[in-house]
Image (spheres, helix red, strand yellow):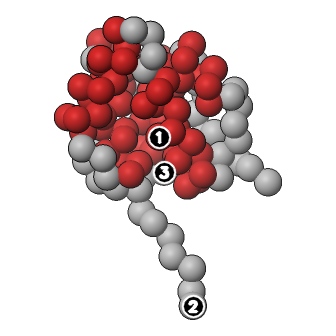
């Protein structure tokens, strides 16, 4: 059974520095999150996110990373990834960054991968 997120989608104001980064430079926060989630190039994804945002399509690059984060931590899809990344992308960026922080992932570090014993 999927776990609940430790931080809410609209809990941005509980962490003002992340909130400001997410709203003032959301493409950078997205790139930083993606780097932590799957080792993507932070700058490359920052540029992609910014370009897609101009057309209102940032969910194209955001949704797969959010899905991967949820799969890694077995998190519930609440609300749907599409709605979170399409309609509330800034809040979703902040939520993802804060979720990783509460789980001990430091900015610039990757999510630890748990291996199964053989």
In the rendered image, the quadrant that contains the N terminus is: bottom right
- Marked residue nearer the N-terminal end (3 or 2): 3
How far is disc 1 from disc 2 in space, using C-alphas? 28 Å
In the rendered image, the quadrant that contains the C terminus is: bottom right
Q: Is any part of residue 118 visible from this angle?
A: yes
Left or right? Give the position of 16 relative to 13: left
Question: On screen, 105 above or below 20?
Answer: below
Q: Which mark is residue 118?
A: 2
CB under 8 Å between callouts 1 and 2?
A: no
Residue visible at 57% across and 42% down in the picture? 67
Quadrant location of residue 10? top right
Residue visible at 70% across and 41% down in the picture? 76
CB under 8 Å between callouts 3 and 2?
A: no
**Element at label 3:** loop
- Marked residue nearer the N-terminal end (1 or 2): 1
How far is disc 3 from disc 2 in space, using C-alphas? 26 Å
Quadrant location of residue 77? top right
- What residue is disc 3 on? 103
Q: Is any part of residue 26 visible from this angle?
A: no
Residue 50: % across, % down: 29, 18
Which mark is nearer the camera, 3 or 2?
2
- What residue is disc 1 on? 65
Residue 103: % across, % down: 48, 51
Residue 79: % across, % down: 69, 26
**Element at label 1:** helix
Q: Residue furthest bottom?
A: 118
Q: Which mark is residue 96?
A: none
Question: On screen, 73 above or below 115?
Answer: above
Left or right? Give the position of 104 relative to 27: right
Residue 2: % across, % down: 74, 49
Q: Within 10 angstroms of label 1, few (less than 14), some, or many (20 or more) residues?
A: many
Left or right? Give the position of 109 relative to 37: left
């Amino acid at each position: 059974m999927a776990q609940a997120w430790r931080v809410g989608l609209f809990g941005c104001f509980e962490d003002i520095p992340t909130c400001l980064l997410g709203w003032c430079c959301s493409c950078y926060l997205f790139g930083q999150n993606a780097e932590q989630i799957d080792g993507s190039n932070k700058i490359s994804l920052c540029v992609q996110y910014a370009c897609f945002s101009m057309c209102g399509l940032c969910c194209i690059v955001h949704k797969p990373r959010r899905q991967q984060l949820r799969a890694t931590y077995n998190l519930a899809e609440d609300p749907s990834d599409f709605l979170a990344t399409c309609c509330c992308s800034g809040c979703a960026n902040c939520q993802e960054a804060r979720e990783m922080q509460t789980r001990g992932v430091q900015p610039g570090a990757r999510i630890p991968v748990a291996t199964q014993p053989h």
